[in-house]
Amino acid sequence: MDHLDEILINIQAEPLPRRLATIDKIVLSQLAERQGNANPLSGRMAGFAIVAAMGMGLVSGVVPGTPAKAAATPSPFGVTTALAPSTLLESG
C-alpha cells in the first residue's frame, strides 16, 4: 500500500493542466448558451398535458377494475410445509 500512497502523492504534487483550470468557465458558458437557445414549453402543450393527465385520472377512476381475491392454498393450514425444517430433518 505504500507504493499506492507514493503514486497518489506524486499525482497530487503535479501542477494542474491549464485547460483543466478553465474548464468550469467553458462548461458554464456553454450551458448558458444552450439555455438561451432553448424554447420554453408552449402554453398549448402545457394545456394539452394538463387535460390529458386529468382525462387519464378520470377514466381510471370511473372504469371499474376487477375485484381482488386471495389465491386458494392447497393446504388447509395455509402455506404448504414441504420445506419446513421439521420435514427436512425427518428425511435424515
Image: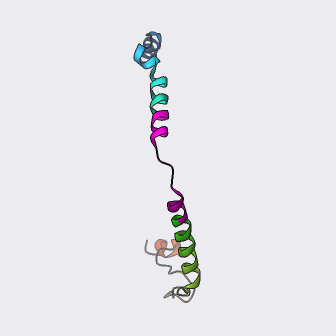
Numbered range of the magenta stretch? 31-47
- Residue 92 shown left or right of residue 67 in the figure: left
**Placement of the N terminus among the 4 image quadrants:** top left
Q: Quick one: 7 or 58, which is closer to the camera?
A: 58
Residue 88 among magenta residues: no
Q: Does 24 sit above or below residue 51?
A: above
Q: Does 37 sit above or below residue 47?
A: above
**Placement of the C terminus among the 4 image quadrants:** bottom left
Q: Position of residue 46 (x, y in %)?
A: 54, 60
Rendered residue at 46%/10% (across/down): 13
**Residue 25 can be seen in this image:** yes
Q: Quick one: 80 or 38, which is closer to the camera?
A: 38
Which secondary structure type mostly characterizes the magenta part of the structure?
helix
Residue 32 among magenta residues: yes
Rendered residue at 49%/38% (across/down): 36
**Residue 17 can be seen in this image:** no
Q: Position of residue 41 (x, y in %)?
A: 51, 53
Q: How is the image coloured?
A: rainbow
Q: Quick one: 14 or 87, which is closer to the camera?
A: 14
Q: Position of residue 59 (x, y in %)?
A: 54, 80
Q: Does 59 sit above or below residue 9?
A: below
- Residue 15 shown left or right of residue 63 in the figure: left
